Image: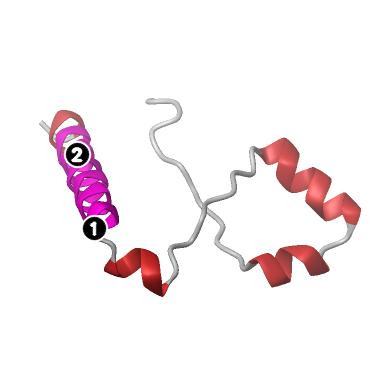
Amino acid sequence: MMEGSKEYFLKMTEQFYNQLGNDEKIYLNHLGLQVKQIPNKEDLEDENYKKVRKHRIDAWNEEQEYLFKKRNK
């Protein structure tokens, strides 16, 4: 059996996170909570951001395709 072959993400707003109690925040931290910046309207219109985002998405898609093909020979 292949270990660690998938990751699961929990998406929540900053407002919701701020409403959590300290125990829940500590638990999420122990699970490996990572904070991601969400682009605003100005970011989405920025040409440099568009290029960075496209490369990130293309790389992610290529990685997923590679892993799928490797595991499903």
Residue identifier under label 1: 50
Residue identifier under label 2: 68
Q: From which residue to which does the magenta span run?
A: 47-67
Image coords of residue 47 (percent x, y): 22, 59
Q: Which of 67/71 is in front?
A: 67
User: Which residue is depicted at the point 16% across and 40% down?
Assistant: 62
**Badge 1 element:** helix
Image coords of residue 8 (percent x, y): 49, 48
Q: What residue type is labelled 2?
A: Phe
Image coords of residue 64 (percent x, y): 23, 41
Q: How crowded is mark 2: few (under 14 residues within 10 Å), some or many (20 or more)?
A: few
User: Which residue is depicted at the point 20% across and 45% down?
Assistant: 55
**Left or right, 28 with reference to 37:** right
| Among the two numbered marks 2 and 1 on one chain, the one whose residue lies closer to the N terminus | 1
Is residue 51 a member of the stretch shown in magenta? Answer: yes
Q: Which amino acid does label 1 sit on?
A: Lys
Q: Which quarter shows the N terminus?
A: top left
